[in-house]
Image (cartoon, grey):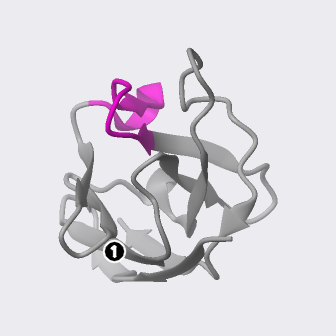
Amino acid sequence: QVQLVESGGGSVQAGESLRLSCEASGYTAAYCMAWFRQASGKEREEVATFSDLTPTTYTDSVKGRFTISKDVTKNTLYLQMNSLKPEDTAMYYCAAERRRPFMPCTGLEYNSWGQGTQVTVSS
């Protein structure tokens, strides 16, 4: 199973940027990787997904502001978050799961999770 460790969260003002990192241990080349978030009192939400063979996906509320990417040399997934809004405040989690043939990464059941990193955006 893949081990995931997130970092990069923090407290910022609205309009500012943060970059989250998710360092993976183990083979992830054939994996879907994703960022999820969970705000206090709300359900967990898929934010963005990435794999080497499928298009990246984003939830509508972050399109044009967030960018998911992966550095294969470092086996690290990133989430660049620009123009942050107070509604982006949440615990952000990295997740990984083996890619399924002919299936997108979005909506996949992920079984490897990091511990989470908190993002707080104040107005």
Query: In this rendering, is residue 63 above or below 121?
Result: above
User: Percent position (x, y) of residue 115?
Assistant: 64, 82
Name the foreground residue: 35 vs 89: 35
- The residue pinned by badge 1 equals 21
At 47% from the left edge and 46% from the top edge, which residue is drawn?
30
- Identify the image quadrant of the C terminus: bottom left
Numbered disc 1: secondary structure: strand
Q: Is residue 60 magenta?
A: yes
Query: Relative to the observer, which residue lies in front, 63 or 108?
Result: 108
Q: Is residue 82 left or right of residue 91?
A: left
Q: Position of residue 121 (x, y in %)?
A: 39, 69
Tell which of 11 and 35 is nearer to you.
Answer: 35
- Badge 1: how crowded within 10 Å, few (<14), some, or many (20+)? many
Q: Which residue occupies 57% across, 37% down?
A: 99
Q: Amino acid at mark 1?
A: Ser
The x and y percentages for residue 69 are 25, 51
The magenta-colored residue range is 49-63
